[in-house]
Image (cartoon, rainbow, N blue to C red):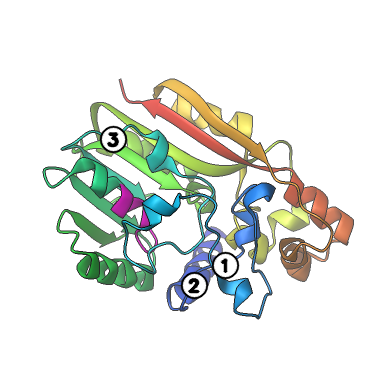
Amino acid sequence: MEKEEVKTKVREAYSRIATMDSGCGCNAAKVPAKRSGGCCGGTSKADTVPDRGLYSAEELATIPEGAELGLGCGNPVALASIKEGERVLDLGSGAGVDCFLAARKTGPKGRVIGVDMTAEMVSRARGNAASGGFANVEFRLGEIENLPVETGTIDLVISNCVINLSTDKPRVFSEIMRVLAPGGRFMVSDMVTDGPLPARIRESVNAYAGCIAGAMEKDEYLRTVRDAGFVDIRVTGDEAMELSQDDPFAAAIMKDSHCTPEEALKAASSVRSLGLSARKP
C-alpha cells in the first residue's frame, strides 16, 4: 500500500467510528487478551460497547459520556505523573478520553491540547469538552507527523495506540522532540511486534487500521526513539495478546489478506502492547 492510501483508509475507518453511538473499531487488536472484547465484525449491541478495562470506574466517572471509545491499548495518563499547571499534548486524541483525564490532573492552571487527523473525531471531542465544561482542553485538526503546535511549548506528550498508525514514525518522534520544552517528556502506549509480520498482512487495510500491519518491531521502535535524541528511555509495560481462533480480529485480518485462520492468529499474537516513557534533554 502507498502511504497516502494508508492514510486515507485509516482516516475513513476512524471517521466511521467517530460517528457511531459508541466506539470500537477493531478493539480486539487494541488491548491485551485479558482486557479484550473486540467488536470487529460484531453486530449486536453488546459487541459495540467500548472495552472498559483500561480505565477505572472512578476515572470514567470524571469524563463526559462518549469520550471513551474503546480504542486504546493502555492508560498513559495513569503512568505519566502529571503535575498541576503542566502543558500536555495528546497525539491522536480521538473523542478526548485521555485529554480529559489529563486535564483533571493539570487543573485550571494547566493546558491540554488534543490533535487528531479526523475531522469527525475533533468535532466529537469538542462537543464532549463543551458538555463537560473543560475550559482548559483544546482540540486541533492535524497530523501527528506535522503537529499544529509551537516549538518548545509542551511539558508532556501522551499517545494511546496511535503512533503505530503513522506511515512515518521517525517523523512523529522528531515532532515530539520539537514541541517538547527542554526537559519535557513523553508517555505513550502503542502496539509493537516481537518479530516480522508476513508481507500480505503488512499489506492488509484491515490489519493496518486495526493497529497490526503498521506496528514496528519492538527493538526498531526503541531504536527510533533513541535516534530522535531522547534519553531516560524506559519500558513501562509490555503485554502480549492471546487470541483464540474464533476471535473476531483474526477474522478481520483474514478478510483482505487471504490468510488462513492459523496465520492470522499467529500474526495477531505476535503484537504486543508497549508502554514507553522518555525525556528530551
Q: Nearer the viewer, mark 3 or mark 1?
A: 3
Mark 3 sits on what residue?
82
Q: Quadrant of the N terminus?
A: bottom right
The spot of residue 45 in percent (x, y) is 59, 79
Callout 2 touching callout 1 (CB < 8 Å) = yes
Magenta segment boundaries in residue numbering = 93-101
Q: Quadrant of residue 2?
A: bottom right
The reply, left or right, for residue 125 in relation to residue 216 is left
User: What's the amino acid at mark 1?
Assistant: Gly
User: What's the amino acid at mark 2?
Assistant: Ile
Q: CA distance from mark 2 to mark 1?
A: 6 Å
Mark 1 sits on what residue?
25
Q: CA distance from mark 3 to mark 1?
A: 29 Å
Is residue 38 a member of the stretch shown in magenta?
A: no
Q: Secondary structure at mark 2?
A: helix
228 or 75, nearer to the observer: 75
Which comes before the other along the chain, label 2 or label 1? 2
Is residue 99 a member of the stretch shown in magenta?
A: yes
Q: CA distance from mark 2 to mark 3?
A: 29 Å
The spot of residue 277 in percent (x, y) is 43, 30
Label of residue 17 in the image: 2
Q: Is residue 24 visible?
A: yes
- Image vertical order of residue 224 relative to residue 116, above or below: above
Residue shown at 74% from the left, 69% from the top: 256
205 or 52, nearer to the observer: 52
Q: Is residue 146 visible?
A: no
233 or 80, nearer to the observer: 80
